[in-house]
């Protein structure tokens, strides 16, 4: 197994540990959660960089890398829902988008015709990663306020204007929009996948 793929697997391995720390309402664990996500994020950048620089890009790596990203990001948002930071419908939109794209990517790999990843689609990743970092920082500050038993006025104003909610509205909109754009850019794969999917559930005579 190549070193970039090992970094990708490390990101997957770190995900459940990162999630576990989120459910511990303690300041040290808030810092640990931030640190673990930071390390996982670094592996996301380094695995691709090293693979391209040393010519170790593999078919397996092209599939595993984005899958590891989705596992990390989606797991974070699911955890944020359970600790009351994001709404369920937002997580469902993000999950639906990732499931559809992953299914298409698997189909495209079997056809030896990789999906087209656009710059527009990368906005989704950037917005989601930024949102996770902001929420993690918010959780650290909030825990500090709780431990001090003296909530700061400026922090209370942030909660009053529902800043996290508004940010997540934007992230969810970007996620949905880029998902639609992704389907349009890869419409040939969408058509082929739809036909293959229907053949699993419709009588063979329907296509004759």
Image (spheres, rainbow, N blue to C red):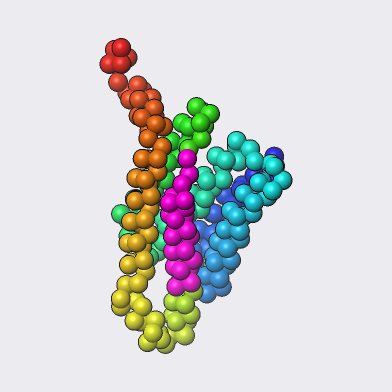
State which region is magenta: 116-138
Tell me if residue 77 is in the magenta stretch: no
Q: Is residue 41 left or right of residue 102?
A: right
Q: Residue at x 63, y 38 (%)?
A: 58
**Whole-percent x, y for residue 123 in the image:** 44, 56
Question: What is the quadrant of residue 101 in the picture?
Answer: top left
In front: 82, or 6? 6
118 or 151: nearer the viewer = 118
Q: Is residue 4 visible?
A: no
User: Which quadrant holds residue 160?
Assistant: bottom left
Q: Position of residue 110 (x, y in %)?
A: 51, 28
Q: Residue at x 35, y 82 (%)?
A: 156
In the rendered structure, does residue 133 fall within the stretch colored magenta? yes
* Residue 93 placement (x, y as % from top left): 34, 50
Task: Examine the rendered structure and indicate whether residue 133 appears above or below residue 71.
Answer: below
Looking at the magenta stretch, what is its main secondary structure? helix
Relative image position of residue 204 (x, y in whole percent): 32, 14
Closer-to-camera residue (19/137): 137
């Amino acid at each position: 197994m190549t070193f970039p793929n090992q970094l990708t697997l490390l990101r997957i391995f770190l995900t459940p540990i990162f999630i576990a720390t989120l459910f511990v309402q303690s300041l040290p664990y808030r810092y640990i959660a931030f640190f673990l996500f930071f390390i996982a994020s670094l592996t996301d950048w380094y695995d691709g960089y090293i693979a391209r620089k040393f010519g170790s890009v593999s078919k397996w790596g092209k599939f595993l890398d984005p899958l590891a990203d989705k596992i990390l990001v989606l797991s974070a948002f699911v955890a944020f829902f359970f600790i009351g930071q994001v709404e369920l419908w937002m997580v469902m939109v993000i999950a639906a988008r990732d499931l559809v794209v992953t299914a298409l990517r698997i189909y495209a790999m079997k056809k030896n015709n990789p999906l087209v990843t656009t710059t527009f689609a990368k906005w989704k990743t950037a917005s989601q990663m930024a949102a996770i970092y902001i929420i993690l920082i918010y959780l650290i500050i909030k825990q500090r306020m709780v431990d001090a038993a003296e909530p700061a006025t400026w922090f209370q104003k942030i909660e009053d204007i529902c800043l996290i909610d508004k940010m997540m509205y934007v992230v969810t909109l970007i996620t949905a929009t880029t998902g639609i754009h992704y389907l349009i850019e890869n419409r040939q794969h969408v058509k082929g996948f739809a036909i293959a999917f229907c053949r699993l559930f419709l009588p063979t005579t329907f296509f004759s």
